[in-house]
Image (cartoon, rainbow, N blue to C red):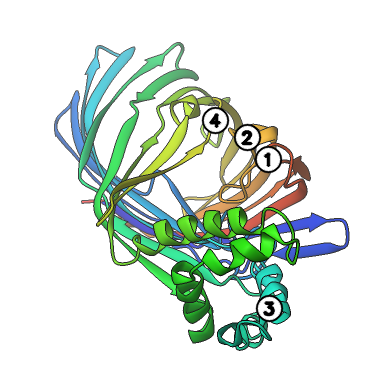
Amino acid sequence: VSLGSILIKSKVDFEQPGYTHKTDNPLSTPIFGHIGYKPCKNLAIGVNLTNPAGNSLVWGDNWAGATMIQNVSLKAFSIQPTISYKIGDVVSLGAGLMIDFGSFAQEKGLVAANAFNGLGTLAGGLSAMMPSLAPLPGMIQSFNNQVPVAIELEGSSKVAYGFNVGALINITPKLTFGVNYRSKVKISVEGGEAELDYANDNAEAVINAIKTFDTTPLQGLEAAGAIPAGTVATLKGTQAQLTQLGVMDNSTFDASMPIPSILSFGLTYQPNEAWTLTGEAQITGWSAYDKLDITFKTAMGEIVQSSVKDYKNTVAVRLGAEWIITDFITARAGAYMDTPPVQMDNYNPETPSADTYGVTAGATLNPTKFLAVDLAVGYLRGAKTTGSYDGGKFVADYTKSAIMPSLGLRFKF
């Protein structure tokens, strides 16, 4: 029986000319647990619990990319009952079921900060002729530089199923080869909750005033050249957009995304009883994540917000070494690199990605023959990455890093 947790403290640094920002991410605590049993010499059964995927980022309410993402939290859990059988002394085969579920929460701005400043200027210029517009400039100024309205999404996924298969081959007494495949699993949120969040009461009042404003008097002013041409058409477009956004408040939504397939190959070499050397290559099938559709169920019918992901498969390479120093302590060290799934011309700060490099170190303490204590720490850093989004309109440099201490306990009966 084994169980434990990893503590992940991560951050992402964002940089544009004249502007810098960094995330304020909470401490993430993915867990792991395993129960294994051998009813006979060549047969083993077990159940595994892990967090195979997750993402937790807090960019803040009013940063430069707030209309793309403010905060996001994705948690996935996988329970894997698995059975394996050893054929002779050379080959072991295993297969099992994957039972996945999770939760999703996201917040992003629906209207950019300062988007209503032009309307405030227009209202101020017309206030002498239309006194009802006089309060608008001051009200708009009260949430200056803030996102006027954002949407908060929250929901839990249905249970989804996949499978895993693997093989272990003892090439020689010192050299072992392994291969493992975990299938793609599509997790879906149905009936998630959506709620609008306004910067303040004035922001809500201004948005409601714009939605219900009668543009008829402005048509004559535009025809007479008293206000710029196109003002009425622009205002009507804004009204239609805000009306659609308004019906999302207290609506429900459906969404789905894949937990990608993983194909891994590994080698273990034991030159002597004290040393073990390992190497692994892993291909993750992120190309399955081509887009994210969020379908809102509103009083006006279904409203679909679609964002293109167009991810590509990634490759990770890992190397490790283990040294049994004494019966009490075993030391370990490792290093790895991973490639990004995100296309650089479709780089959304919702999932900042980069060529990533990591180092790890750890030890196992064996205070008794029934108990082992696993201690480890990892550090990763992504290469500074320049990405763009929305047709090259949002270009920035991103640098990510994380430190990851972990604690595990193993009991043998």
Q: Name the residue under label 2.
A: 340
Q: Mark 4 points at which residue?
A: 311
Q: Residue 25 carries which label?
A: none
Mark 3 Cα within 10 Å, few/some/many (few <14, many 20+)?
some
Q: Is residue 101 above or below residue 344?
A: below
The residue tagged with tag 1: helix, strand or loop?
Answer: loop
Q: Mark 1 or 4 closer to N-term? A: 4
Give the answer, above or below, for where 118 lies relative to 390.
Answer: below
Where residue 62 appears, as percent x and y from the top left, is 63, 70
Residue 126 numbered mark, or none: 3
Instruction: Estimate the spatial distance between the alpha carbons at disc 4 and disc 2, rounded to whole Å.
Output: 9 Å
Query: Alpha-carbon distance for marks 3 and 4?
Result: 49 Å
Instruction: Estimate the x, y position of residue 339 in percent, counting from the top left.
Output: 64, 32
Name which of mark 3 and mark 1 comes first in the sequence: 3
Q: Position of residue 31 (x, y in %)?
A: 37, 56
Q: Which residue was labeled with disc 1?
A: 354
Q: Which of 234 and 401 is in front in this view?
A: 234
Residue furthest to the left in view is 39
| Observer-nearest of 114 and 100 | 114
Rate crowding at label 4 as few (under 14), some (14 to 19) or many (20 or more) other CA atoms within 10 Å: some
Q: What residue type is labelled 4?
A: Tyr
Marks 2 and 3, Cα distance to the nearest angstrom? 52 Å
* 2 to the left or right of 196: left
Left or right: residue 248 compared with residue 81: right
- Residues at discs 2 and 1 in contact (Cβ within 8 Å): yes
